């Protein structure tokens, strides 16, 4: 995976832990601050394919968000823990667009079969959220939270519609440096 190589070589994570979210394959890869792989888990992502957040979506109530606005935006984010509307601490990926990483919510999760979707053998049914990234509860509490709790960490969300170099421009420089054409 090109993003893993780039982050490892460039130290783009600034000695913080990081995750890479692959929306197309509905997977998350967790790395410690040195780049050592810690875990890989299935995830649930936004219902709508797309790599941009709709302007103003973060200030809307859940009931006001239309189906086409329920995207998980691609990009590089410095994620930190903070309070959500239920007064629970969650890992905010992008507070302005209300995108966070959190376990499957109990109330909504059962009604929508989110656990079953996450455990299905293909990523075809893993688009169900309003844009947040749902992860298994055990992974969240035992792996992700301990690594990100003190200083946060980086979240790299891979695109599903835009070219990867458009979302992560530094990949072009990294590729040129490795080709020998750029010295």
Image (spheres, helix red, strand yellow):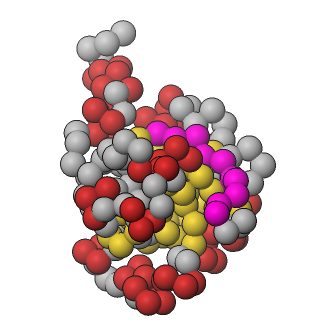
Membership of 137 in magenta stretch: no
Residue 12, position as x, y percentages in the image: 53, 32
Residue 32, position as x, y percentages in the image: 64, 50
Magenta residues? 76-85
Res. 122 image quadrant: bottom left
Q: Is residue 171 visible?
A: yes
Membership of 77 in magenta stretch: yes
Which part of the image, by quadrant, shows the C terminus?
top left
> In the image, what residue occupies the spot 57% across and 66% down?
102
Where 50 sits versus 46, above or below?
above
Q: Is residue 79 left or right of residue 41?
A: right
> In the image, what residue occupies the spot 31% across and 56% down?
69
- Viewer-nearest residue: 72 or 3: 72
Where 110 sits versus 144, above or below?
below
> In the image, what residue occupies the spot 38% across and 26% down?
170
- Viewer-nearest residue: 157 or 2: 157
> In the image, what residue occupies the spot 23% across and 42% down?
162
Residue 114, position as x, y percentages in the image: 43, 82
Where 70 sits versus 20, above or below?
below
């Amino acid at each position: 995976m090109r993003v893993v190589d780039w982050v490892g070589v460039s130290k783009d994570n600034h000695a913080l832990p990081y995750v890479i979210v692959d929306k197309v394959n509905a997977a998350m890869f967790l790395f410690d601050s040195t780049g050592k792989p810690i875990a890989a888990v299935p995830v649930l992502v936004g219902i709508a394919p797309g790599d941009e957040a709709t302007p103003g979506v973060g200030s809307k109530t859940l009931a006001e968000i239309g189906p086409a606005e329920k995207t998980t935006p691609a990009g590089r984010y410095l994620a930190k823990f903070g309070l959500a509307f239920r007064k629970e601490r969650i890992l905010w990926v992008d507070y302005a667009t209300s995108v966070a990483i959190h376990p499957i919510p109990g109330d909504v999760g059962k009604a929508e079969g989110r656990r079953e979707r996450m455990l299905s053998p293909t990523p075809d049914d893993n688009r169900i959220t309003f844009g947040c990234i749902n992860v298994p509860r055990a992974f969240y509490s035992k792996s992700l939270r301990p690594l990100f709790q003190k200083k946060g960490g980086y979240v790299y969300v891979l695109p599903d519609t835009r070219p990867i170099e458009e979302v992560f421009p530094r990949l072009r420089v990294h590729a040129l440096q490795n080709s020998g054409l750029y010295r």
